[in-house]
Image (spheres, helix red, strand yellow):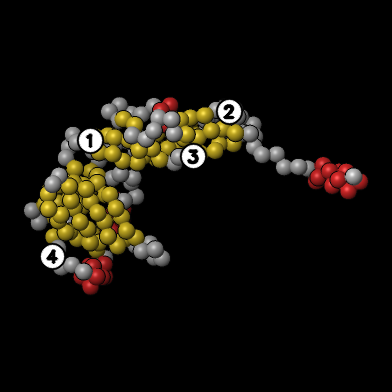
Amino acid sequence: MPDVAITVESRNEFGKGAARKIRRAHKVPAVLYGHGTEPRHLTLPGHALLLALRTPNVLIHLQGEGIDEIALPKGVQRDPIKGHLEHVDLLLVKRGEKVTVEIPINVLGEPIGSAIVDQQLVTLAVEAEATHIPTGVDVDVAGKDAGFVVNAGDITLPEGTTLVDDPEALVLQVIAAPVAALPEEAAAEGEAEAAE
């Protein structure tokens, strides 16, 4: 996974007033922590950060003001109404280091006939090298019939990636579509009950 380079500024003003001032300038307050270092308070450009966060588990290469680090977004706070970024927590990572992340599960294909997919998990917790985080895993249900089940341990993970979730956790199952009673059948049942 490529790094997304973002130019950062150090910040030494804190509190709600300072954060509002940063946001008015279309920037986002952030905290960088990890590896036993003191947390560093940063300001990131809002638009560049928003674009970077569109990629799940994106690695952000922070540069500027004596900072040259790689970080993984761990906590993103958004305005509940307007949706704009309010604050980001960034976890410092090193090349070669293993990190635990959630990756999306992509369901491919369609089951046989009227069978439907009942998906229980949409992400999978895995451990991977910080600079080689998979973008997701695929589960193919094409041509599968009711009764087909996939547990977390059944999914083939990319090389260098290990499962953190319980291998017995149900990811998805193919089930028979519920059958609705036809109007004539429902009416006949109603008449039979009335006659009793």
Q: CA distance from mark 1 to mark 4?
A: 31 Å
Residue farthest along the left direction in this orientation: 66
Task: Give the quadrant of residue 104.
Answer: top left
Q: Which residue is mark 3?
A: 120
Q: Which mark is residue 12?
A: 4
Looking at the image, how many numbered discs can be counted on the residues?
Answer: 4
| Secondary element at image label 2 | loop
For the point 51% across and 39% down, the residue is 119
Residue type marked 2: Gly
Q: Are marks 1 and 2 in contact (CB under 8 Å)?
A: no
Q: Is residue 4 visible?
A: no
As drawn, which residue projects farthest toward the front?
196
**Mark 4 or mark 3, which is nearer to you?**
3
Secondary structure under the numbered disc 3 in the rendered image: loop
Question: Which residue position holds label 1?
Answer: 98
Mark 3 nearby-residue class (10 Å; few <14, some 14–19, many ≥20): few
CA gap between label 1 and label 3 equals: 27 Å
Q: Are marks 4 and 2 in contact (CB under 8 Å)?
A: no
What kind of element bears circle 4?
loop
Of the numbered discs 2 and 3, the one sitting upstream in the chain is: 3
Of mark 4 and mark 2, the one earlier in the sequence is: 4
Q: Tell me: residue 18, above or below residue 144.
A: below
Mark 1: secondary structure:
strand
Q: Is residue 194 left or right of residue 167?
A: right
Q: Amino acid at mark 4?
A: Asn
Please give the residue where the numbered disc 2 appears in the rendered image.
147
